[in-house]
Amino acid sequence: MKKLAFIMFSLLLAGCGHSSEGENAPKSKEVQGEVKKEKAEKAVNKEEPADAKPKEDITGKPVLAYLKEEKTNGDIKGIGMDPVTGRKVMAITQKMQNSIAANKAWFAEYTQKNMKEGEALPYSPKFGITEKEYQLLLDSQNHSEMIKKGETSVEIKRQGDKLTVTAPNSSFKTAVFDLKANTVKTKYGVLSYKGKIEASSEQAITGPWSGEAWKFEDGNVKTMQDAQNMDENSYIKSVNFYVGKLQDTGETLIYFTYRELKDMKKSQADEFIVLK
């Protein structure tokens, strides 16, 4: 990923002269005054060049801390794991799904009784897998990493209060940040700002990164009871857009997720773009 770079050019003006009386010859008060005035002007010009643009206040425009106008390229990455572990996890997942499908009523009741926010369901033999296999499923994120699956050109262009990110080979194609409203518009909906992401050792797939988050949610499945009674009329849509910086490399990260359930059909996308 290409690091965000802030380049400052300084023009250093220096003058020196030699009089016939030597370098240490005393100067008149008038000359001394001119020298002081010249030094003061240079000091001011060094700190604030006459042609320098005032630095923009990015308060309320968090995306500008990470993205600037440029044309570059990015690696498109997905979530994956080594082939051996991947096949094991897929096989275990399929066994568990088959068992749950055969025990829907039991699973709905078990979930209602045992589900706690932020915690996994406790193991049950009725999952159709062993306790060791269930633990592998729970730990699967620790075996996952970003795996390159392609590349894309990336153009970031600003027009007034709009910052447009165009990545033709990505899932989202184009994302338009409204700097005034602090939203981001994608083909999946308009996402509202949700706050900062703090770097953490728990970010196992990407490694620690910090950044900003935007989110869009829609649908009629709002509660656990709704989830237990889903049918062909159930609808869920969730879209997340993140922009940040990888702690270990300093590279800029764009992270996009999309989930939708409609007419009992699931669609989803998980994609990282690491700017070069």
Image: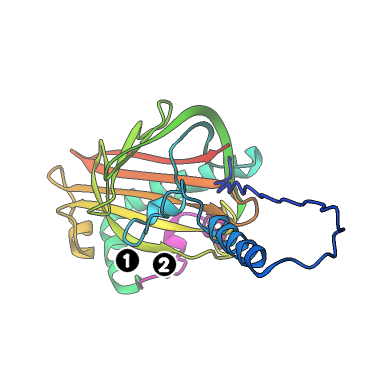
Can you give x and y, in whole percent of width and height, for residue 69 in the image? 43, 38
Between disc 2 and disc 1, whose residue precedes?
A: 1
Query: Which disc, if any, is residue 111?
Result: 1
- The magenta stretch spans which residues? 116-141
Which image quarter: residue 200? bottom right
Q: Is residue 125 magenta?
A: yes
Q: Amino acid at mark 1?
A: Thr
The answer to which of 268 and 69 lies nearer the viewer is: 69
For residue 81, side relative to residue 56 (left or right): right
Q: On screen, 7 above or below 211?
A: above
CA–CA distance in space, label 2 to label 1? 7 Å
Query: Which disc, if any, is residue 43?
Result: none
Q: Which residue is mark 2?
A: 121
Do tag 2 and tag 1 residues touch (Cβ < 8 Å)? yes
Q: Quadrant of the C terminus?
A: top right
**Residue at image coords 15%, 42%:** 232
The reply to whether residue 136 is visible in this rendering is no
Can you give x and y, in whole percent of width and height, for residue 167 in the image? 41, 30
Which image quarter: residue 221? bottom left
Q: Residues within 10 Å of mark 2 (few under 14, many from 20)?
A: some
Q: Is residue 84 magenta?
A: no
Q: Amino acid at mark 2?
A: Leu
Q: On screen, 238 above or below 44?
A: above
**Residue at image coords 55%, 64%:** 202
